[in-house]
Amino acid sequence: MQRIVPDLPSASLPAAQQFYADVLGLITVMDHGWIVTMSDPLHPGVQLSLMTHDRTAPTRPNVSIQVDDLDVAYAAAVAAGAEIVHPVTVEPWGVRRFLVRDPDGNVINVLEHG
């Protein structure tokens, strides 16, 4: 496990970015237009993402979990009988990922940076 980042829904990314900048002092470290990741400037690993939708998957995840080995995580999810919401995919923004649903219905974006 390398990091865990909450993925919050947003109807207006600019308004949400302004809120988190004004209230918590977060800065934008990634902006793809549909997902924005913000971070504490003094602690770059402390992050949250704001999303309007997921560009390539059928649903927006609740959280993103970056792992060391995506293939091991995927095999474990399949072996556990978990619902795979989005198959292992190499995304244009430089990650390999899959989406899986947990027993409570939360969608988890499991990713590995390429």
Image (cartoon, grey):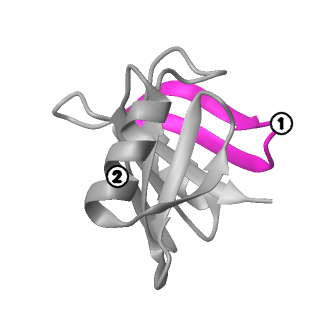
In the picture, measured across the screen, residue 111 lies left or right of residue 92, that is left
* Prevailing secondary structure class for the magenta stretch in the rendered image: strand
Q: Which residue is mark 2?
A: 20
Q: Quadrant of residue 97?
A: top right
Cα distance, mark 1 to mark 2? 27 Å
Q: Is residue 108 visible?
A: no
In the picture, measured across the screen, residue 36 lies left or right of residue 61, that is right
Location of residue 103 in the rendering, given as x and y in whole percent from the top left corner? 20, 35
In the picture, measured across the screen, residue 102 lies left or right of residue 97, that is left
In the picture, measured across the screen, residue 15 lies left or right of residue 71, that is left
Location of residue 54 in the rendering, given as x and y in whole percent from the top left corner? 55, 24
Kindly state the secondary structure of the residue where label 2 is placed.
helix
Kindly state the secondary structure of the residue where label 1 is placed.
loop
Q: Report the residue that reaches farthest toward the left.
A: 104
Residue ID at (58%, 21%): 57
Q: Is residue 14 above or below residue 79?
A: above
Q: Is residue 61 above or below residue 45?
A: above
Q: Which residue is mark 1?
A: 92
Q: Amino acid at mark 1?
A: Pro
Q: Is residue 57 above or below residue 16?
A: above
Q: Quadrant of residue 87?
A: top right
Residue ID at (42%, 63%): 26
Residue ID at (29%, 64%): 24
Q: Is residue 12 visible?
A: yes
**First to last magenta residue range:** 82-100
Quarter holding the C terminus? bottom right
Location of residue 35 in the rendering, given as x and y in whole percent from the top left corner? 56, 36
